[in-house]
Structures are given as structure tokens and as C-alpha cells.
């Protein structure tokens, strides 16, 4: 049994009190400057100081995973990934306007969007723009994503971009690449000051929900898995003193690093199983619904990690009572390793589920848990958003077809030339 002690760390009689106390879940930012303050200690924490996200420790080589970055959201993700890995080992292409791209100060494959793309409320204009630029876009993607098997697509919440992406998804499939979208469900305006209506936020919500409706209607052959993050949960998980814009920026940095960690895990040895890119692709191959991220950053070296899996509201991007269809969980314990019973407890959580559990070599300080899961159904918090469509009136602005859309038929929203979302007030409903 000596090999078990070597692998997991020495057994302790008081393991029950050795539970990490200092940690952040995916949406939590409750320990400001903890990484920065550790720099003056004997064992500094290795991670991003802005978002307090620990880095999985390992070597990254040329990856068969690529990226498509769109809009300001995508450019911010791109910046965070480049800060983590300066070497040109990740295949990518950027869709943004000229100002956004120039702010990156980077040389990368680039497709220029109209300067006002984020103001165009139209799926059909995005589709038309793709068709008009199809040859250039397709050639650029073929070059940028050469030798790529899986591509993560970061999509900013605008109907114009969703229209473009709806076409790009089929091109990616044609290249025999597995696409995975990353989508943020915007902060719900419930509870805000009465009378304050954020038009951009409403447009963002309607556009995203219409796009998810489009994705879920696809046939099994055309399944396009998408990772969902809930910006409302981001607000609930942190102190109100932290501004929401600041929280969003920190989450974007953390999101980029979590995905980088998952990719890195496919290239580094696991203590038990041979893990590679095929394990990652398998999660998304037959996914017919949303996928969720799971993340915990533990800033102390206590080895009892299994109890942290109870912190689900903080650690996962959404909650769903149904079991996942597939999953991939990476754990990198601290220098003391995992206790044998702790590994058994974590393994038990995923008993009889198609979930790969990878235990990485011990860290020098702290510990991390990273995961991604696929599902077959939409989570309840998204379904609730569709019910809120009764609070909106969608005006069609086509020259020949003006009027209001029947929100029970979202397919028609893809066809109209342009639309405008109007919040219905309580007074309007009374009338």
C-alpha cells in the first residue's frame, strides 16, 4: 500500500478537519489580492492576479484545439489567453471591428466586422453579410483552423453576430471540426430600479434566447453544443460593493484560464488514466443541449477536497437536477496530494456516470478543480427567461412588412430585416 501513500499523500487520523477554508467557486471573487499577496511568501500561488484564478501547472505544446473570438467579448478572452501563453501554439481567428482589433496590438487572423455591428438588431443581416463575404471567411477559417479537431467559439450577444455564427457552424462541421459555443446569459433586470430600462440588455437577452432556440431545433446530425454561463449568478455570488462591470471583466479572465487549464489537462499525464484530446471531444460529440463549466480555486493545501463538491451554486455555471450525459473533471491537488478516502468520495460522486476523472501531478501550492459536462435539456433558469417574453413587444422594422412579431414563433425573427424590442410596462398591460 506504500504506492497509495506516495500517490495521495500520507494518511491522517484527523482528515475530517482538513477541509480547505479559503477558496473561490466559478462565480466568486471573495479573496482579493490573495495571489498577489502570496508573492512574498516561500510558496507563492501560481495564477492570474486580476481574477485570482490559479493556473494548472504543466507544459503546453501545439494544440489541436482552436478558437474563434467574436466582438469585444471575444477580444477580451483572446487577450487573457495571450497573457497566459505568449507562444503561437493555439490556432485562432478573430471577428471584430477595426477598433477592437487594433486595441489588441496583436498579429492574428482577422475578419473585419462592420464598425456598428453591435447596433444592428438583425439575424438576417448577419446571414447576408456572411454570404457576401463567404469566400474570404471560408478561406481564412481553413487556413487558421488547419489541423484543428475542436474549436471553442466565443460569441458576443448580438443578433448580427448570431446570424454570422449560424452559418459558420456549418462551415466548421464541413471541415470535420467539432464546434463548441460559449454563451453568456445576461444579467436579469428583475430587481432593478423601477422605470430604468436597459435597451441593450433587452436586445441581448432576446437575441441570445432566439439563438438558443435555433440551436436546440437542429437535428442530431447538426448538434451544436454550447457552454452556458449565467451572469445573474455572478451578481448573486459576490458582495454588492463590487461593481457588476468589474465582476464581468474578472469572470472573462477566469473563463479564459479555465478553458486553458482544460486544454492543458489533455496534454499532461494523469495519475490513473491516459488522457488526451479524444476524451475532451467525446464530451461534445453527441451533446444535444447545453454544457456547463465547473471550477474551484483552493488557496490552501488541505487535501480534503470532496466536501467542496457540495458548493455547487458557486462552482458550476448552472444547476440542473438531471445527470450529465458525459463529463471531464480535472483535479490538481496541493503538495500533500489527495487522501485515499477523498479520492474514493470524489469518484463516488460520478458513480455510474460517463465522467472521466483525471488526477494531475501535485501542485507546489493551492489546488484546483476544473470540469465540463454535457446535458440533453435546457436548465430551468433559461426556460424562465422565455416566459419573460410576455413582457416584450418585438416590432418588425422591414420596409414591406411592418408590425409586431408573435413571440411564440421565434423562427420568424430570423427572417425579418430588422427588429426592435420594447419593454411592456405595467401600465401598457393594463391598457
Image: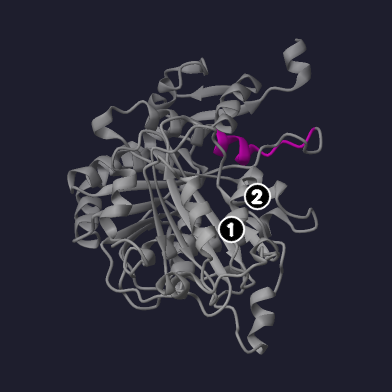
Location of the N terminus (image quadrant): bottom left
Looking at the image, residue 210 lies above or below residue 356: above
* Mark 2–mark 1 distance (CA, rounded to whole Å): 8 Å
**Nearest the eye: 277 or 96:** 277
Q: In this view, does 143 lie above or below 47?
A: above
Relative to 175, does residue 194 appear above or below in the rendering? above
Q: Name the residue under label 1.
A: 251
Front residue of 424/360: it is 360
- Which residue is painted at 59% across and 78% down in the image? 45
Marks 1 and 2: in contact by CB < 8 Å?
yes
Query: Neighbour class for label 1 at 10 Å: few (<14), some, many (≥20)?
Result: many
Q: Is residue 23 rendered magenta in the image?
A: no
Residue wearing tag 2: 234
Q: Which of marks 2 and 1 is nearer the N terminus?
A: 2
Q: Quadrant of residue 318?
A: top right
Percent position of residue 80, x then y:
49, 68
Judged left or right of residue 422, residue 55 is left
Residue at (22%, 43%) from the top-left corner? 173
The residue at 64%/50% (across/down) is 311
Q: Residue furthest top?
A: 431
**What is the x, y in percent for residue 146?**
19, 61
Residue lying at the far front in this picture: please name it: 1
> Which residues fall within the magenta stretch?
195-205
Q: Name the spot of residue 388 as percent of width and height, x first.
A: 63, 24
**Residue at x 33% of width, y 37% of height:** 127
* Few, some or many residues within 10 Å of mark 2 (<14, 14–19, 20+): many
Identify the colour scheme used: one colour
- Element marked by disc 2: helix
- Residue 197 is one of the magenta-drawn residues: yes
For residue 218, side relative to residue 171 (left or right) = right
Disc 1 element: helix
Amino acid at each position: 500500500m506504500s504506492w497509495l501513500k506516495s500517490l495521495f499523500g500520507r494518511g491522517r487520523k484527523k482528515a475530517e478537519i482538513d477541509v480547505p477554508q479559503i477558496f473561490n467557486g466559478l462565480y466568486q471573487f471573495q479573496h482579493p489580492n490573495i495571489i498577489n499577496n502570496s508573492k512574498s511568501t516561500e510558496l507563492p500561488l501560481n495564477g492570474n492576479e486580476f481574477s485570482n484564478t490559479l493556473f494548472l501547472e504543466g507544459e503546453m505544446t501545439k494544440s489541436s484545439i482552436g478558437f474563434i473570438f467574436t466582438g469585444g467579448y471575444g477580444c477580451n478572452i483572446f487577450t487573457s489567453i495571450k497573457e497566459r501563453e505568449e507562444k503561437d501554439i493555439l490556432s485562432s481567428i478573430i471577428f471584430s471591428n477595426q477598433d477592437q482589433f487594433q486595441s489588441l496590438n496583436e498579429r492574428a487572423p482577422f475578419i473585419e466586422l462592420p464598425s456598428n455591428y453591435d447596433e444592428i438588431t438583425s439575424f438576417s443581416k448577419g446571414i447576408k453579410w456572411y454570404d457576401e463575404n463567404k469566400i474570404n471567411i471560408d478561406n481564412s477559417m481553413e487556413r487558421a483552423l488547419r489541423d484543428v479537431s475542436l474549436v471553442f467559439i466565443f460569441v458576443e450577444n448580438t443578433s448580427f453576430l448570431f446570424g454570422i455564427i449560424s452559418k459558420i457552424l456549418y462551415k466548421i462541421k464541413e471541415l470535420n471540426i467539432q464546434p463548441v459555443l460559449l454563451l453568456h446569459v445576461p444579467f436579469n433586470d428583475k430587481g432593478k430600479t423601477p422605470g430604468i430600462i436597459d435597451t441593450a440588455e433587452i436586445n441581448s437577452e432576446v437575441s441570445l434566447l432566439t439563438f438558443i432556440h435555433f440551436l436546440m431545433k437542429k437535428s442530431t446530425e447538426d448538434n451544436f453544443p454550447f457552454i452556458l454561463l449565467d451572469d445573474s449568478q455572478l451578481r448573486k455570488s459576490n458582495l454588492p460593493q463590487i461593481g457588476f462591470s468589474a465582476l464581468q471583466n474578472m469572470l472573462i479572465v477566469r473563463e479564459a484560464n479555465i478553458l486553458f487549464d482544460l486544454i492543458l489537462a489533455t496534454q499532461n499525464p494523469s495519475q490513473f488514466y491516459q488522457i488526451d484530446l479524444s476524451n475532451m471531444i467525446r464530451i461534445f460529440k453527441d451533446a444535444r443541449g447545453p454544457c456547463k463549466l465547473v471550477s474551484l480555486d483552493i488557496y490552501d493545501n488541505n487535501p480534503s477536497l470532496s466536501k467542496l463538491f457540495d458548493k455547487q451554486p458557486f462552482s458550476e455555471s448552472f444547476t440542473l437536477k438531471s445527470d450529465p450525459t458525459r463529463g471531464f473533471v480535472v483535479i490538481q491537488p496541493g503538495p500533500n496530494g489527495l487522501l485515499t478516502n477523498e479520492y474514493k468520495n470524489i469518484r463516488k460522486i460520478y458513480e455510474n456516470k460517463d465522467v472521466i476523472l483525471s488526477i494531475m501531478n501535485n501542485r507546489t501550492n493551492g489546488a484546483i478543480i476544473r470540469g465540463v459536462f454535457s446535458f440533453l435539456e435546457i436548465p430551468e433558469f433559461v426556460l424562465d427567461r422565455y416566459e419573460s417574453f410576455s413582457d416584450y413587444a418585438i416590432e418588425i422594422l422591414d420596409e414591406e412588412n411592418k408590425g409586431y412579431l408573435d413571440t411564440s414563433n421565434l423562427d420568424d425573427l430570423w427572417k425579418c430585416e430588422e427588429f426592435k424590442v420594447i419593454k411592456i410596462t405595467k401600465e401598457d398591460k393594463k391598457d
